[in-house]
Image (cartoon, rainbow, N blue to C red):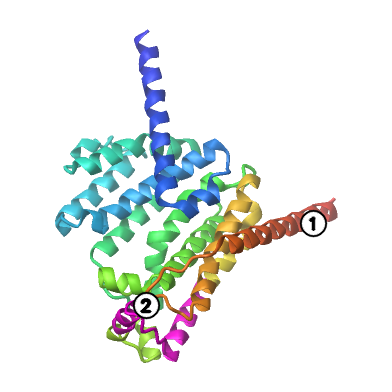
Amino acid sequence: MIAAQNEDKTITVLEQSYRATRILIKNRAKSFYRAFSRLSEERFNAIAAVYAFCRYADDLVDDMFASRTAAQTEALLENLEKTVLSLYGGRVQDASRTADEALKTSMEEWLPALTDTVQRFSIPKDGFLAQIRGQYLDLHFQDIKTSDELIEYCRLVAGSVGLMLAPILADEKINPCDEDFLSACENLGIGMQITNILRDIGEDILTRNRIYLPQDMMITHNLTKDDILHMSKAAVQGNIAIPAQFTALWEELSRLGTGFYNDYVRYLMYFQSSCRLSVAAAALIYQAIEDEVRKNGYNCFSRRCSTSKLTKFKLILKATQLITELQSRKATAVSKER
């Protein structure tokens, strides 16, 4: 009788945990929520749990907890890493070790769901640990010197999300640990993060005094951090004059990101059938943010550009057509083999 009561309690806690993660993703990641909310309940729950982990890790370093010292935040990231390792056979980490009550409550809300998700989908720990390493880089941010450094940063903070989601989205008939498939998922995350950087240049420098544009690219285009700061302040005041060298730099970085976006198309059929449209649409819609920046005269300083509802609808149709074409090619190939 006691065992049954404990089992019921465990189920209730798990259900409550998944419910909390679904609310979180709906409220704080509307585009992500729209992209994946039509999946099966099991898969969407798992995505919400992974998102909750990523949101928590990001918030540790974000401004909402700016009253903490860097050393205190480092300790929280270390605690989070120990928590992750405990999901893979290590000693169970007690969320009560987190001194901040808000953080403690947050972790207690999503940890049961994440634990269940990791076990249910056999998600490797590499993506979680990479995400935490990326947060360390943000905590002790230094100007990015080269495009290789930028790619490595994007791999940690966003490519890691692709690695975490891959086993959830993969078709049952393929090996979710297939290196090429994982690389495609990781690269898609890198491409999306480059889009984030291109969209938020003004916001990053004005609110966080950060610039993610590689210094070697800036030198090539005869730009400095002070130039970017001046453009951002002027744009906020309504004086929007985007010099040609900035446009050239922006487009060079966009081309770099495009190479990472292109990779996922070759592996789109590796995704579970109910996930393909979500993945393809999310990739097309996200990359289209860059077109909105172009339409806005490359003003990524005084506003955050986003795709319109009509554009999203058109891109969903485009994604549908892409999947239909890939399915037709696959059917033709199977027919020829016979």
Residues shaded magenta: 228-257
Q: Quadrant of the N terminus?
A: top left
Mark 2 secondary-structure assignment: loop
- Image location of residue 264, percent across then percent down: 58, 61
Instruction: Measure the C-alpha gap from mark 2 to mark 1.
Output: 43 Å
- Image location of residue 287, percent across then percent down: 53, 67
Give the number of the disc on residue 333.
1
- Image location of residue 336, percent across then percent down: 84, 55
Q: Nearer the viewer, residue 107 or 116?
A: 107
- Image location of residue 24, percent across then percent down: 39, 44
Residue appearing at x 31%, y 86% in the figure? 227
Relative to 220, does residue 145 appear above or below in the rendering? above
- In the visual, does 122 lie left or right of 214? right
The three-letter code of the residue at mark 1 reads Ala
Location of residue 299 (image quadrant): bottom left
Q: How many marks?
A: 2
Give the number of the disc on residue 137.
none
Residue appearing at x 47%, y 41% in the figure? 46
Question: Circle 2 sits on which residue?
Answer: 213
Relative to 229, does residue 276 appear above or below in the rendering? above
